[in-house]
Image: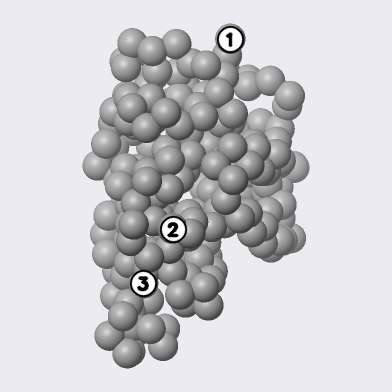
Amino acid sequence: MSRGAIVVLSGGLDSTVCLARAVRAHSPVVAFTVDYGQRHRIELERAAAVAEHYSVEHVVQRLDLASWGGSALTDGELAVPTASEAADGPAIPITYVPGRNLIFLSLAVALAEVRDARAVYLGVNALDYSGYPDCRPEFVDSFRTTAALALRRGVEGDAVEVVTPLVQLRKADIVRLGVTLDAPLALTWSCYRGDTEPCDDCDACALRAKGFAEAGIADPARR
């Protein structure tokens, strides 16, 4: 196996498939989750369950982005829009958390340097997604350059590899890949609302349902 990896794990479908892929290519693997004050805190429980499933170390970083507000995922006074409301609204919806992936990747590559891990995996997707600017390939490419300049590892010629294996996949293809990798999709959570059951109404729920439907696979989390 290749040298170790850090996987940014939210507890959602995409990050879980990334973890399933990483554990086949790297050892050791560390699951890295950020508790940023998100309203859908159930995803933190799902991330822990997924990490436990793979028997990997789980590092949880607490970071209070809720104190900033500016997103329906961190500000309780802002309503999470329905999928149709999001489609009819601005190109970048109110569920966008300013700088989230930029912050997550910065923390993850720093952890990778400390742990001497070869790579950081991030489950961003630029095809079936909500239009967030920090999910685009252009952002990731730019970050790779910045990280190589910012870290000692990069200066010494051993830059941390930032791996985004899902970035050009449709959600249906991600579902199929997850099944092929035997990822624990039943443990994953995608809903933006913090209830005990998915709302089936928000953009995240709609994208997940679309992916499973197009893949022709029943969602194991909904049985």
Please name the residue shown 38% across and 65% down the image: 3
Q: What's the distance in space between the residues labelled 1 and 3, CA to CA?
A: 39 Å
Q: What's the distance in space between the residues labelled 1 and 2, CA to CA?
A: 33 Å
The label nearer to you, 1 versus 2, is: 2
Please name the residue shown 63% across and 20% down the image: 199
159 left or right, relative to 201: left
Q: Could you say whether the residue bearing mark 3 is in a helix, strand or loop?
A: loop
Q: Mark 1 sits on what residue?
A: 223
211 left or right, relative to 51: left
Instruction: Indicate the amino acid at tag 2.
Output: Ser
* Location of residue 157 in the rendering, given as x and y in whole percent from the top left corner: 27, 85
Instruction: Indicate the amino acid at tag 1.
Output: Arg
Q: Judge the density around disc 1: few (<14), some (14-19), many (≥20) Cα neighbours within 10 Å.
A: few
Mark number displayed over residue 27: 2
Q: Could you say whether the residue bearing mark 1 is in a helix, strand or loop?
A: loop
Are circles 1 and 3 on residues that touch, CB within 8 Å? no
Q: Quadrant of residue 43?
A: top right
Instruction: Indicate the amino acid at tag 3.
Output: Val
Q: Is residue 64 visible?
A: yes
Please name the residue shown 43% across and 48% down the image: 23
Q: Mark 3 sits on what residue?
A: 160
